[in-house]
Image (cartoon, grey):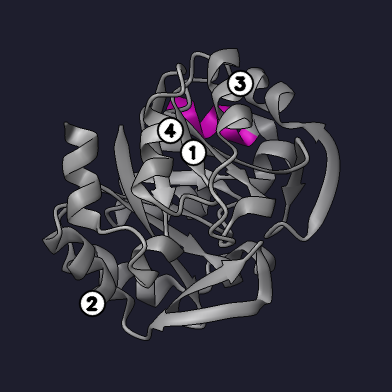
Amino acid sequence: MILYPAIDLKDGQAVRLLRGEMEKATVFNDDPAAQARAFVAAGCDWLHLVDLNGAFAGQPVNAAAVEAILEACDVPAQLGGGIRDMKTIETWLDKGLARVILGTVAVENPDLVREAARAFPGQVAVGIDARGGKVATKGWAEETDVDATDLARSFEDAGVAAIIYTDINRDGAMQGPNVEATAALARAVSIPVIASGGVSSIDDLIALRDCGAPLNGAISGRALYDGAIDLQQALATLRG
């Protein structure tokens, strides 16, 4: 199981939100590229990047910070937030991103997800962010009545590389991930699933790894910044 260190970008800084609320942002590093280098030096295999401003704006906002990270690091990176048309997808992949994450458009324009997955095999993931099992969009600001599992199943034949499933109520709260819901989603589809939200200890990572469902990986942010998870130790544990 891959551990994806998260770098959430707001106003050019690496931050963490509490349950997706922009006004509850804690700045952890004002040099995101330096933060990325630190994660890579600890041995991570991937980076998970989020353009928080972009998610609300519907277009890239923290492009300069993302580009600096891509220039600074030689591990693959995936990015979500504000990616809602083919031109933006193509631009980011041309800049060296390994994978784009489509969230809001997965609900509002699923045909775009299918088109992108065909055009860029292995480079398009779907981000499913849910409160109480229902999908939220536009930086989690808008609730929908779309069921997370139903949305995941709708892309079963689309060729997407992964589904990143976030339990919003757990995100940044350091209360542990929703293992049960994540495992249930992973069992419901054949698409690789990455767990996100609430991963706050190595025990949480082990619980996800051993949940009985084939999880591709887990994303952690605040716990790495706070020191609740030692990245090198976590990587060694997961690699077993």
Q: Amino acid at mark 2?
A: Ala
Give the position of the C terminus as an image quadrant: top left
Please give the name of the residue rendered at 17% of the width and 59% of the height, measured from the top-left corner: 40
Q: Which residues are magenta?
A: 112-119
Mark 4 or 1: in front is: 4
| Rendered location of residue 205, percent (x, y) | 38, 40
Q: Amino acid at mark 3?
A: Ala
What's the mark number on residue 224? none
Q: Residues within 10 Å of mark 4 (few under 14, many from 20)?
A: some
In the figure, residue 134 lies in which quadrant?
Answer: top right
Of 85 and 150, the residue lying toward us: 150
Looking at the image, residue 150 lies above or below residue 14: above
Mark found first going from the N terminus, 2 or 1 = 2
> Given this view, does label 2 or label 4 mark the residue nearer the observer?
4
Above or below: residue 226 compared with residue 116: below
Q: Earlier in the sequence, mark 4 or mark 1?
A: 1
Using the numbered discs, state the Cα–Cα distance from disc 2 to disc 3 in whole angstroms. Answer: 36 Å
227 relative position to 213: left or right: left
Residue at position x 39%, y 51% in the image: 201
The CA distance from mark 3 to mark 4 is 14 Å
Q: Which label is found at residue 195?
A: 1
**Of the residues under marks 3 and 4, which one precedes in the sequence?**
3
Q: Nearer the viewer, mark 2 or mark 1?
A: 1
Number of residues whose C-alpha sits closer than 10 Å to that of mark 3, classed few (under 14), some (14–19) or many (20 or more): some
Residue 47: tell me if it is visible.
yes
- The CA span between labels 2 and 1 is 25 Å
Q: Disc 1 or 3, which lies upstream in sequence?
A: 3
Circle 2 Cα neighbour tier, 10 Å, few/some/many (<14 / 14–19 / ≥20):
some
Residue 120 in the image, given as x and y percentages of width and height: 39, 33
Residue type at tag 4: Ala
Q: CA distance from mark 1 to mark 3?
A: 11 Å
Q: Which residue is under mark 3?
A: 184
